[in-house]
Image (cartoon, grey):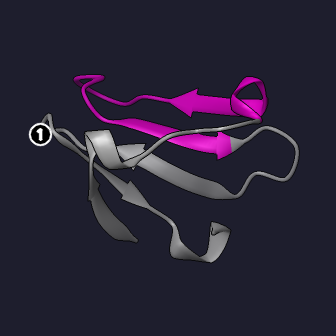
Amino acid sequence: MTKVHNRALTVESGEDLLSIHEWNTQRAKHFLCSRCGIYTFRRMRRAGSFAVNEFCL
């Protein structure tokens, strides 16, 4: 996982194929491919950044 600033991440296509999972406080959001299940990226609990799975790039 690589940390990137909110403004540095743009989903250009396939957003409708993402599943969102939230736990506990629901502040962190985990995005997975609804077809294959790969963990693509997550919105960190602290506002301002995402963690991106480098192997999806």
**Location of residue 39 by image quarter:** bottom right
Question: Magenta segment: does it hold 25?
Answer: yes
- Taking the view exactly as shown, the residue that stands out farthest to the bottom is 55
Region rendered in magenta: 14-32
Indicate the position of residue 52 as horizontal and vertical percent values: 44, 60
Residue 46 is drawn in which quadrant? top left
Q: State whether residue 50 is above or below residue 48.
A: below
Q: Is residue 21 above or below residue 37?
A: above
Quarter placement of the N terminus? bottom left
Residue at screen point 75% across, 23% down: 16
Residue at figure coordinates x 88%, y 43% from the top left: 35
Residue 36: x %, y % from top left: 85, 53
Name the residue tied to disc 1.
Answer: 46
**Left/right of residue 39 with respect to residue 14 in the rendered view:** left
The residue that appears at 30% across and 23% down in the rendered structure is: 26
In the rendered structure, which amino acid carries the disc numbered 1?
Arg
